[in-house]
Image (spheres, rainbow, N blue to C red):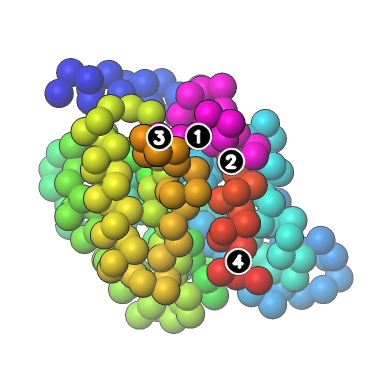
């Protein structure tokens, strides 16, 4: 319990050190060409670009550059859990974060996405959420998005984290549940970054010891872009 509290405080500290708004370049490389699709990303720190030396080298930044005729909007924010991404006014336990109307599903739907990418890693587990809670929240977000007319909802697995054996075990469970529940709409970004101990491969780890570096982000980009290109 004490270890989880320390990890949560560390995440909060990191969040305080990062800008609250990401100036994500949106749109294609040729401003004269209209966007043929809008991709909105909601999630937490890695989706927001943490660990990369510059946003353009993050997986989301690379996606923005690669999809020349698509508009990419990134609403992800470091430290966020699946609860902050729930629809506005969604019911949630009193001891869980409230939906953030600037970055949740409702904010994403305002952008009229053709594709929604949901990418959350370990923050839910660190504040004590069960994998069942996480999947339930994912189900709510996915069903509401599809009902609103979003053509594709892509959900990533979590990433390996160098925290504790308990967190790693739950990350593996979350990975398995995402792959089982969402099938062809699920993207496994855990295994390509993990070593045999289910921790992030050292050569893919940034200096903060938590997030992927430029090379790690490139690995994630290649996997996710394979679902879009």
Tag 4's secondary structure? helix
Determine which quarter of the picture holds residue 217.
top right
Q: Position of residue 30 (x, y in %)?
A: 85, 65
**Who comes first in sequence, dot 4 or dot 2?**
2
Instruction: Using residue 112 as the reference point, say whether residue 122 is left or right of it.
Output: left
Task: Look at the numbered discs 1 and 3 and tell me whether their residues touch, using CB distance below 8 Å.
Answer: yes
Q: Residue at x 28, y 27 (%)?
A: 164
Mark number displayed over residue 199: 3
Mark 1 lies on residue: 201
Task: Look at the numbered discs 1 and 4 and tell me whether their residues touch, using CB distance below 8 Å.
Answer: no
Determine which quarter of the picture holds residue 13.
top left
Task: Look at the numbered discs 2 and 1 and tell me whether their residues touch, using CB distance below 8 Å.
Answer: yes
Task: Look at the numbered discs 3 and 2 and tell me whether their residues touch, using CB distance below 8 Å.
Answer: no
Q: CA distance from mark 4 to mark 2?
A: 16 Å
Instruction: Using residue 181 as the reference point, say whether residue 199 is left or right of it.
Output: right
Q: Which residues are magenta?
A: 199-215
Q: Residues within 10 Å of mark 2 (few under 14, many from 20)?
A: many
Q: Residue at x 46, y 29 (%)?
A: 210
Q: CA distance from mark 4 to mark 3?
A: 24 Å
Q: Residues within 10 Å of mark 4 (few under 14, many from 20)?
A: few
Q: Is residue 30 above or below residue 3?
A: below
**Majority secondary structure of magenta residues:** loop
Q: CA distance from mark 1 to mark 3?
A: 6 Å
């Amino acid at each position: 319990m004490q270890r989880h509290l320390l990890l949560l405080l560390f995440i909060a500290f990191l969040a305080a050190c990062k800008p609250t708004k990401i100036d994500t370049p949106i749109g294609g490389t040729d401003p004269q060409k209209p966007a043929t699709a809008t991709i909105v990303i909601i999630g937490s720190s890695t989706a927001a670009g943490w660990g990369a030396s510059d946003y353009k080298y993050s997986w989301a930044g690379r996606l923005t550059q690669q999809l020349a005729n698509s508009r990419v909007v990134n609403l992800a924010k470091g430290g966020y859990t699946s609860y902050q991404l729930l629809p506005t006014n969604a019911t949630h336990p009193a001891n869980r974060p409230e939906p953030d109307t600037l970055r949740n599903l409702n904010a994403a739907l305002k952008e009229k996405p053709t594709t929604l990418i949901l990418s959350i890693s370990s923050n839910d587990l660190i504040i004590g959420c069960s994998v069942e809670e996480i999947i339930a929240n994912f189900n709510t977000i996915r069903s509401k998005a599809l009902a609103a007319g979003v053509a594709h909802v892509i959900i990533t697995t979590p990433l390996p984290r160098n925290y504790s054996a308990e967190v790693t075990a739950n990350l593996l469970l979350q990975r398995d549940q995402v792959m089982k529940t969402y099938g062809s709409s699920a993207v496994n970004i855990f295994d390509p970054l993990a070593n045999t101990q289910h921790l992030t491969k050292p050569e893919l780890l940034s200096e903060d010891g938590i997030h992927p570096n430029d090379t790690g982000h490139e690995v994630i980009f290649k996997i996710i872009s394979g679902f879009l290109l």
